[in-house]
Amino acid sequence: MGDQADDLHIALDPGTTTWTVCWKWSSSRAVHNLKFGSTYSEKDNEELDATVGRSLSNWHYGLDVRYLDVQKFENIKLGILGQEPYTRELKQSFQATARAHGVAETPVTLFENLFKHILATLADRYLEAPESEGLLRGRRFKDIQKLCWVTHPVRRNESLRIILFEAALAARFYRVDGVSESMAAAHFVAFQTKNQIFTAGKTALIGDCGGGSTVMLYGCQSGDAYTEPVGRTL
């Protein structure tokens, strides 16, 4: 590692019904699931409910939205991807927010505030990781560079990718990268098994079953390295 200070790598998987977030220090192999608390539940949750609420003064995320009298945004991902009736419903939710609160919100500002919520939650949690104290080097959370990875569907993803990238940069991530959901699943399996799933002469088949489609990927080992998994959407 030398004298270079560690960055925080944060990955967001915006699903159809829930969002999940993982994070790690750049020099550590330990990956942590970010846990979210709730005013209405004693248990922390490793999944963040994908329904979002907007009040006059703030955005609201997670289980709390179900119990609040706020303008609700549901099926956000499907709406951005152009699937009806969700696209129409998402537009109507933004219009209702403008009428009720006099603010012109957009999918970018929705996700920007989601990323800020994730960073605020991580600021309360990152010291729980046993390796954090040795990697902080006296820095405060706000002084640590943070890299964001976001997943996106394999197909019809341009609008969602642009929104996620713009929102993450607006939330002050210093760098944003993207990876398809199915490719992320394949690399996660490879990481968890230390590439042992890709054995010489054999092909590994990995299925990514999402809310709107299922993608099957396969990869095999060639020499000392495995080939980049190739996928097909069903």
Image (cartoon, grey):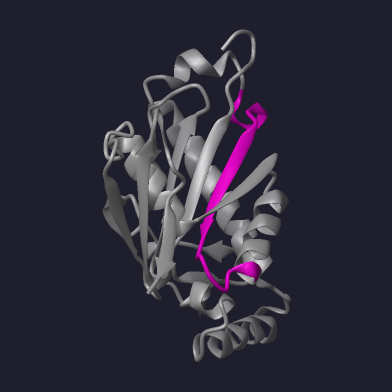
Between 1 and 227, which is closer to the camera in this rendering?
Answer: 227
Above or below — where is 32 with respect to 217?
A: above
Quadrant in which the C terminus is drawn:
bottom left
Instruction: Confirm whether residue 36 shows in the render.
Output: no
Instruction: Confirm whether residue 153 shows in the render.
Output: yes
Residue at 38% of width from left, 28% of height from top? 30
| Horizontal arrangement in the rendering, residue 112 relative to residue 215 (left or right) | right
Query: What x and y, as percent, mark residue 78?
Result: 49, 77
Is 141 included in the stretch rendered in magenta?
A: yes
Disc count in the image?
0
Quadrant in which the N terminus is drawn:
top right
Above or below — where is 33 with respect to 92?
A: above
Between 214 and 229, which is closer to the camera in this rendering?
Answer: 229
Query: What x and y, as percent, mark residue 220?
Result: 35, 44
Is 58 included in the stretch rendered in magenta?
A: no
Between 232 and 46, which is closer to the camera in this rendering?
Answer: 232
- Give the quarter of the image for residue 142: top right
Query: What x and y, as percent, mark residue 33?
Result: 37, 42
Between 208 and 100, which is closer to the camera in this rendering?
Answer: 208
Query: What x and y, as percent, mark residue 170?
Result: 72, 52
| Horizontal arrangement in the rendering, residue 85 relative to residue 129 (left or right) | right
Residue at 54% of width from left, 36% of height from top? 9
- Give the quarter of the image for residue 90: bottom right
Residue at 45% of width from left, 58% of height from top? 181
Please provide the residue range marked out in magenta: 140-158
